[in-house]
Amino acid sequence: MSFEEERKRMVEVQLRGRGIEDGRVLKVMGNAPRHRFVSKEHEQSAYADHPLPIGEGQTISQPYMVALMTECMELEGNERVLEIGTGSGYQVAILAQLAKEVCSIERVEKLSLKAKEILTQLGYTNVKLKVGDGTKGWKEHSPYQAIMVTAGSPDIPQSLLDQLSEGGRIVIPVGGSFSQELMVVRKRKGKAKTRKVCGCVFVPLIGEFGWKQ
């Protein structure tokens, strides 16, 4: 089966079949070459229904979780988005097709450089990448209409809420260092209004306002 065929099957079985309804999300998940964001040894598993290692103790999330978190962002196309945890760059590629601009922070320089290389090769021009402590956000480009955190946080960092525009939303796994609840946080009159989506397991969010290394 070709990568294109595997991608189509992923969309129909793993995403649409499990309740992902946003047509724009399904379309871009069907377009993005996920196999380009994993190592050669994991290429044949790129569209399987589970996370994969990308080195440096980090992972690329399973396709369903990528789609679910993206759907929770409720993007319309004119937003500036902040992503915490660039990782492989795959989630950046998905968001870049759905938003006006994506700013992404990664604490591991090696991963950030590799992601930049792949995203450039694939022609994504509306992304900005930075190496640093993602828990502090990226104030220079704020406010953001939506923020996605792709690592498990002990709570909702106030620094990110401060950089979110009024009415904006943060999609973030919150809980312990081994398991979390995926939450959607909306900013209403400067306060966080939260909604739980489902249980999940992410690598820990390391930083000043996350877990200590």
Image (cartoon, rainbow, N blue to C red):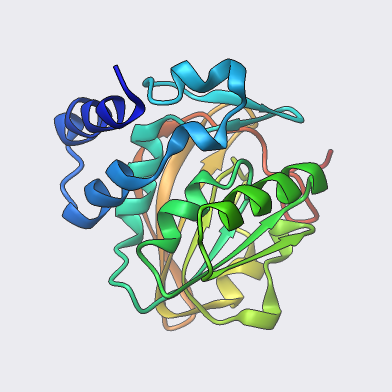
Question: Quadrant of residue 205 in the image?
Answer: top right
Expressed as whole percent of the image width and height from the top left, the position of residue 16 reads 17, 36
- Residue drawn 60% across the image and 48% down it: 118
- Residue drawn 44% across the image and 62% down it: 96
Viewer-side residue, 80 vs 212: 80
Side of 66 relative to 84 (left or right): left
- Residue drawn 51% across the image and 29% down it: 201
Question: Quadrant of residue 30 in the image?
Answer: top left
Question: Quadrant of residue 59 in the image?
Answer: top right
- Residue drawn 76% across the image and 30% down it: 56
In this view, 103 is above or below 2: below
**Quick one: quadrant of the C terminus?**
top right
In this view, 48 is above or below 152: above
Expressed as whole percent of the image width and height from the top left, the position of residue 195 reads 34, 53
**Quick one: quadrant of the N terminus?**
top left
Expressed as whole percent of the image width and height from the top left, the position of residue 47 reads 38, 25
Side of 156 relative to 7 (left or right): right
Expressed as whole percent of the image width and height from the top left, the position of residue 51 reads 50, 25
Tell me how many marks there are: 0
In this view, 124 is above or below 85: below
